[in-house]
């Protein structure tokens, strides 16, 4: 391990000069063939616009290519000594660590997966001997009463099983203001002063105890570090879609990440999870600003992470990317439709950052991160417009054969773009093979085959994403606001044909009409455009095929798209796949009660009732009008059944401890004739289930 060098402004300038100098040279080299074409066209205005679009799209390719090649060279030489994880010897940690909060914001997530992940991390921390320095906070914004009650039960069960009382806390917000960033801000206001550091996780995050302890030690070792972002590896993929993506991240990712650190150094970015934050400057300087009232994208920023990193840098602290720190994991969306749902929110949030590009005091590197996030989605409509203008030129009645840059026979330009696209993947694959003399695959042939399979996957995916991102961008600027929805993280159901056609049908119709027009007016141009059209035309088949868990499992068994964590899984990943069981009578999940099983448990089961009431924060004063309204809800619930109450009314009732206790007592003490038939049946089934459980326990004894 080379010693960590002193990072001086001169070193930073030198690295950035080299990196951006290479980018400029490559951009000029790619622009020359396109410029030659543009000069020779009679369509001056259209040609100039195409040239400009090409430059913008090429700039992104060049940026990624330069990062990948730079990272490849560094990793071939043994790694960059100027990386944050290199400031400490491997495995070292202090006997007494600074107090650290591990916060997990959740919103209608699967409680079993969330709490099993917390259990695994808590027990892994205890094995390090430093567990007492960490406290876990489950910060719930769930608005589904079933999820809410399940979370409370799971929290108590987790604390009982791990003896985690005093170290594992659960908090349900009454008002879910500003989504995830508001949830974190609320935690900081209430408890932030009690901790020096905060580690933010997502609901599907898993980190080993060693990684968590090392993050704290790295912060202690580097007092000017405000945020250290880990490289969270994609794991536990079941569907073919997930497994291909996590394979691509493992094989291609290291050079890109090493190259990013080369020019960023302490000016990295924040991804919003699997990162440690120095709380005092975060609370003082990183409050999310609101956009101007004239913004068509709303006033509250959804994608808070990049903004927080920029504000941390503006306050004088560094943001580092610990890309070589092992033990940080997350999961991916199970299929394309789920991924698009998530991407729409990310797209909207990133576009909101346009208004921050000229924010005073923001560092240049932070502005580049903001611009890169914007272009991750804005490049889609630019690409779409580029293809559209190519089509217009190719179909013009008096167009020369070489009127459109696509199909013009400009093989130099095509070869240059292909090199930018595929050379990084080739270099990354050779590096991966050299680092794994006995690769985690059944053969080198299957490794190469998996790489080729991923290239086909990306080839089909790219135009599909182009169409959808274009739609997302247009919808955002036309005033279509995006709501924060719970993410679909389960891959146990393949999207139905109706779901696929509903989501993908309009894109397929556009592509069919587009291709028919080209075939009618200029069939020779259709060959070029078919490279773009084939993915959207196969979108339904592609979505359903890659969303299949059985296909993913068959690929794993046969040695395709394997990752290191699948061949030799860490103990934590093995444990997180075990179910987190919370005892409950099975009838609560019966079809007759599934819609309201959370509400049913709170009012019927004394144990769950006590848990829920104990976790409610007592309201200091309730107006007579509010009390009358809530009592009326309780009467309707018992007399008319839960189906007569809406979701908001059920939540209002569950927030009132007095009403919950009163309804519980009435349910147990009232004659059956004073209750709705739904409650009578539930009460009878509950008693029958309780008798069976008692008999089973007696037989065991």
Image (cartoon, rainbow, N blue to C red):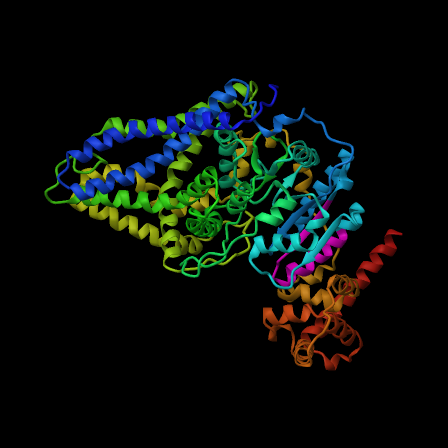
- Asked whether residue 448 is in view, the answer is no
Residue 182 located within the stretch drawn in magenta? no
Q: In this view, does 208 lie above or below 518?
A: above
How far across and how far down the image is residue 530, in percent?
28, 40
Between residue 416 and residue 67, name the one nearer to us: 67
Q: Quadrant of the N terminus?
A: top right
Residue drawn at x 70%, y 50% is: 193
State left or right for residue 528 relative to residue 344. Answer: left
State left or right for residue 141 relative to residue 23. Answer: right
How far across and how far down the image is residue 656, in percent?
70, 70
How far across and how far down the image is residue 638, in percent?
69, 77
Q: In this view, does 653 lie above or below 417?
A: below
> How many numbered marks appear?
0
Residue drawn at x 87%, y 56% is: 698
Residue 142 located within the stretch drawn in magenta? yes
- Image: magenta residue range: 135-157
State left or right for residue 699 relative to residue 288. Answer: right
Q: Quadrant of residue 692?
A: bottom right
Q: Quadrant of residue 54?
A: top left
Q: In this view, does 444 lie above or below 123?
A: above
- Asked whether residue 666 is in view, the answer is yes
Between residue 689 and residue 68, name the one nearer to us: 68
State left or right for residue 22 relative to residue 387. Answer: right
**Outermost residue, right direction?**
701
How far across and how far down the image is residue 476, in percent?
40, 55
Q: In which quarter of the image is residue 179?
A: bottom right
């Amino acid at each position: 391990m080379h010693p960590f060098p002193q990072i001086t402004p001169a070193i930073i300038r030198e690295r950035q000069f080299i990196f951006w100098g290479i980018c400029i040279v490559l951009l000029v080299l790619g622009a020359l063939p396109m410029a030659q074409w543009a000069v020779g066209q009679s369509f001056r205005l259209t040609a100039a616009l195409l040239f400009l679009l090409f430059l913008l799209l090429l700039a992104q390719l060049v940026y990624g290519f330069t990062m990948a090649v730079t990272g490849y060279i560094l990793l071939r030489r043994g790694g960059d000594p100027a990386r944050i994880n290199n400031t400490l010897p491997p495995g070292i940690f202090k006997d007494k660590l600074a107090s650290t909060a591990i916060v997990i914001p959740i919103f209608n997530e699967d409680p079993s997966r969330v709490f099993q992940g917390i259990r695994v991390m808590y027990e892994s921390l205890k094995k390090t001997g430093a567990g007492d320095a960490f406290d876990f906070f489950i910060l719930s914004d769930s608005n589904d009463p079933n999820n809410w009650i399940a979370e409370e039960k799971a929290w108590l069960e987790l604390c009982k099983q791990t003896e985690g009382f005093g170290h594992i806390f659960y908090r349900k917000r009454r008002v879910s203001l500003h989504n995830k960033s508001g949830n974190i801000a609320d935690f900081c206001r209430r408890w932030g002063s009690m901790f020096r550091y905060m580690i933010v996780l997502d609901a599907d995050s898993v980190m080993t105890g060693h990684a968590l302890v090392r993050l704290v030690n790295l912060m202690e070792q580097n007092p000017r570090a405000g945020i250290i972002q880990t490289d969270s590896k994609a794991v536990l993929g079941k569907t073919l879609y997930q497994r291909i993506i996590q394979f691509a991240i493992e094989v291609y990712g290291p050079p890109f990440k090493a190259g990013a650190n080369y020019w960023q150094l302490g000016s990295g970015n924040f991804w919003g999870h699997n990162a440690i934050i120095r709380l005092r400057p975060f609370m003082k300087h990183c409050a999310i600003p609101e956009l101007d009232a004239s913004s068509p994208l709303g006033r509250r920023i959804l994608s808070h992470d990049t903004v927080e990193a920029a504000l941390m840098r503006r306050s004088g602290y560094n943001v580092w990317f610990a890309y070589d720190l092992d033990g940080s994991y997350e999961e991916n969306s199970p299929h394309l439709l789920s991924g698009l749902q998530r991407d729409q929110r990310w797209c909207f949030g990133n576009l909101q950052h346009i208004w921050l590009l000229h924010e005073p005091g923001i560092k240049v590197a932070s502005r580049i991160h903001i611009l890169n996030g914007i272009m991750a989605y804005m490049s889609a409509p630019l690409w779409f417009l580029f293809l559209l203008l190519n089509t217009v030129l190719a179909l013009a009645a008096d167009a020369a054969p070489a009127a459109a840059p696509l199909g013009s026979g400009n093989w130099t330009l095509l070869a240059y773009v292909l090199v930018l696209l595929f050379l990084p993947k080739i270099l990354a694959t050779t590096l991966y093979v050299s680092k794994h003399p006995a690769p985690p695959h059944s053969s080198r042939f299957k490794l190469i085959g998996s790489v080729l399979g991923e290239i086909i996957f990306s080839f089909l995916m790219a135009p599909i994403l182009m169409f959808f991102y274009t739609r997302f961008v247009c919808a955002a600027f036309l005033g279509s606001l995006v709501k924060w929805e719970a993410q679909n993280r389960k891959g146990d159901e393949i999207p139905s044909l109706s779901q696929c056609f509903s989501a993908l049908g309009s894109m397929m119709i556009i592509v069919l009409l587009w291709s028919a027009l080209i075939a009618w007016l200029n069939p020779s141009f259709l060959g070029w455009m078919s490279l773009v059209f084939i993915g959207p035309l196969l979108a339904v088949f592609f979505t359903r095929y890659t969303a299949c868990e059985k296909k993913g499992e068959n690929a794993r068994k046969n040695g395709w798209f394997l990752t290191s964590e699948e061949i030799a899984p860490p103990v934590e990943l093995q444990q997180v796949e075990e179910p987190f069981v919370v005892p409950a009578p099975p009838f609560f999940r019966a079809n007759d009660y599934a819609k309201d099983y959370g509400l049913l448990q709170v009012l019927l089961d004394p144990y769950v009732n006590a848990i829920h009431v104990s976790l409610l924060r007592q309201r200091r004063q309730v107006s007579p009008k509010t009390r009358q309204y809530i009592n009326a809800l309780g009467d309707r619930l018992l007399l008319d059944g839960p189906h007569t109450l809406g979701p908001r009314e059920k939540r209002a009732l569950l927030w009132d401890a007095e009403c919950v206790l009163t309804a519980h007592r009435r349910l147990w003490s009232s004659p059956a004739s004073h209750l709705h038939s739904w409650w009578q049946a539930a009460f009878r089934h509950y008693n029958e289930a309780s008798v069976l459980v008692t008999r089973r326990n007696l037989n065991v004894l």
